[in-house]
Amino acid sequence: MKILEHPAEKKEESTRQVDKIMELLKREGIRFIDLQFTDIPGKLQHVTITTEYLDEQTFEVGVPKLDGSSIRGFVEIQESDMVLKPDASTFAIIPWSANSTKTARMLCDVYWGLGKGRFERDPRAVAQRAEEELKKMGFDTSFWGPEIEFFVFDKVCWDVQTPSRGQSYSIESKEAPWSVGTGYPIRFKEGYYPAPPQDTLMDFRNECARILTDYFGIEVEAHHHEVATAGQCEIDMKYDTLTRMADKSMTLKYVVKNVAHQMGLVATMMPKPVFMDNASGMHVHCSLWKDGQNAFYDPDDTYAELSQIGRYFCGGLLEHSRALAAIVAPTTNSYRRLVPGYEAPVFIAWSRANRSANIRIPVYHVGKSNASKKRIEFRTPDPSCNPYLCFAAVLMAGLDGIKRKIDCGDPVDEDIYKMSPEKRALLGIKQLPGSLIEAVECLESDREFLKPVFDDSLVDVLVDMARRQHLEVSLRPHPYEFYLYFDV
């Protein structure tokens, strides 16, 4: 894959892409353009314009159609005029749009109005600044490969609008053990790799993979049913550079939800919707490259072929894991996942194969012929996070480790879940935050490593949003509290 470095090359490539798009609009009979961008929590937003409104100049000056005060975490009402500049490289025809209203989409960068430049809190801008910071440290690029897990249900309903009457939710899935007469239910924790007809979602995942590849140009390496019952899935994309992979992660979520909708299903990136079963994670694989070589690879390291730079990167992740949690596991529901017993990484440690640690160095293949595959897997994130902010924060933590030469210590190859608290203390193994509010407090006391990529106001917004979420959930009586305390 060619990585454009020179501004003149970038401009020339962009011009070619714009020319190609303008030609496609006429040839394909495209009537509408969906301009998409991501808000601070990580939800895809959009505004649709007619193709008559789009011309070559639009890519330079942008589309003045955004009220930033109505987007979560953006701006106040007195500074709300904002501009969307489409990225021509993200152009794709939306396959489920009807021929009579044929629509294409482009992801956008967010700018201030009044010509004040790039909006600092635009999540895509954060990812792009992180890539610039990487180059300042002498690296060429980084590659990222998230394993995005999610659930696909037949039906979900809940009642939270009448709290005085009670609150509830229900999940329907033909795969679930609580369903009756629907085929071959999957028992709790036994959903990993079952063949059809027990895996009822193979055709769904095939369709997602087909659309991602054929329409959005995203190469899918594999997909499968995950460990949990009731429709837990995973789709793995081929690795890419940081911002491009964040774009692809947002596109995957978009495709998954829309394909599910077309099939009469409903997909969710909520980490822990099913009690007593595994939750959805988003393990993030990454590597740094310099002079065309994988900077994490060292053939002389007998433990995991991990270089000193890779070890420093791990040291940064270990140092900042508790603060990172607020960004990579940003919901109250995230901490229903980060508990012992469900394969989630509760403890802060590193290892070459130990999935009870939150950092793993995969060792499926070794030797110089596999040097390009050497990578670090950070297992804390879940799919509820904003991928632009997640990847950028992980990179900044790792780069801080490299700058300060933070030692990652000895690897832990034992099952940490089975260790006594005394042994964990002896080995210096800390635990990830047990709640969103604890994670936020860690972020507030450890935020310097995020500069200058994360604007201070962005971190403040993330903290404020998380505190409000925590308060909203804490205020409400829980159904299980009736079971525990009604007879006190």
Image: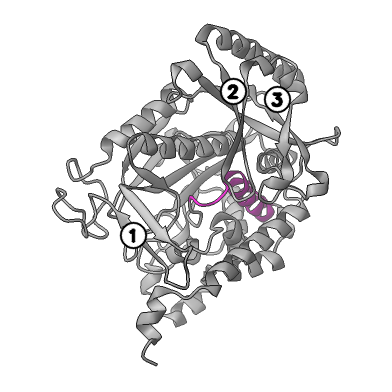
The picture quadrant where one finds residue 142 is: top right
Nearest the camera: 62 or 169?
A: 169
Residue neighbourhood size for the residue with mark 1, other residues' Cα within 10 Å, grouped as few (<14), some (14–19), many (≥20) = few
Q: CA distance from mark 2 to mark 3?
A: 29 Å
- Residue 170: numbered disc: 1
> What residue sits 38% from the left and 38% below the top?
261
| Image coordinates for residue 104, horizontal then vertical, percent | 54, 22
3D distance between C-alphas at marks 1 and 2: 37 Å
Whichever of callouts 1 and 3 sits on the residue coming sooner in the sequence is: 3
At label 1, which amino acid type do we have?
Ser
Residue at position x 32%, y 32% from top?
206
Image x and y of residue 290, in percent: 63, 35
- Say what amino acid the circle numbered 2 marks: Ile
Which residue is denoted by mark 3 in the rendering?
Answer: 5
Q: Please provide the residue range marked out in magenta.
A: 383-402
The label number, if any, that marks residue 33 in the structure image: 2
Say few, some or many: other residues with alpha carbon within 10 Å of mark 3 (under 14 / 14 to 19 / 20 or more).
few
